Image (spheres, helix red, strand yellow):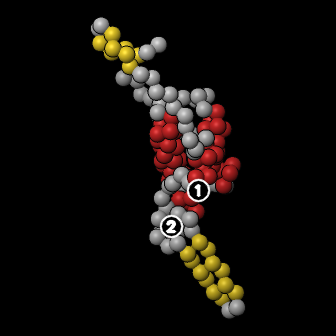
Amino acid sequence: MADETPLVLATPGDYAARYGETDDAARLRALLSDATAILLSAYEARWGDEYAPGAHPAFDRSATAVCCLLANRVLAAPQMLTGATQYSQTAGSYNASVTYGSAMGEMYLGKADLKRLGLYGSLVRELRPMLEVEDGLSDNP
């Protein structure tokens, strides 16, 4: 069996172009791989087929950007504050507050992400009746 290279929808270079360099390259590669798996699972759930480049252009146009965004959601939440949804700091009369969207550092696809990928909304499917023929069941042409 040939050794296949796993599909990754975004590279560390793609991430750096959008969000800047990160100190932990190994973690970034793992997160981009995880994000790819999430996107491909959503693609397969929506279309019922394995990902094929070119089959759904909206997905292809946005997959790299959304993959980087998923990784950034995890990297943007400081590891020392895992689980915190808000952080406030006060010095004298100055106050700063931050709200984290991914407090546990989990990856998720939101409605806007799914829309951007062309994976959101209603689908019209076709049902084809099966007709009985002498040698068994067959698709109706």
Q: Label 2's element?
A: loop
Extreme-top residue of the structure:
134
The three-letter amino acid code for the residue at tag 2 is Ala
Write down the quadrant of residue 137 in the picture.
top left
Residue at 29% across / 8% down in the picture?
Answer: 135
Write down the quadrant of residue 57 in the picture.
top right
Residue 118 vs residue 38: left or right?
Answer: right
Residue 64 seen in the figure = no
Q: Nearer the viewer, residue 102 or 80?
A: 102
- Which residue was labeled with disc 2? 103
Residue at 57% across / 45% down in the picture?
Answer: 120
- Which residue was labeled with disc 1? 72
Q: Nearer the viewer, residue 84 or 41?
A: 41
Residue at 66% across / 88% down in the picture?
Answer: 91
Mark 1 / mark 2, whichever is N-terminal: 1
Residue 116 drawn at (x, y percent): 64, 45
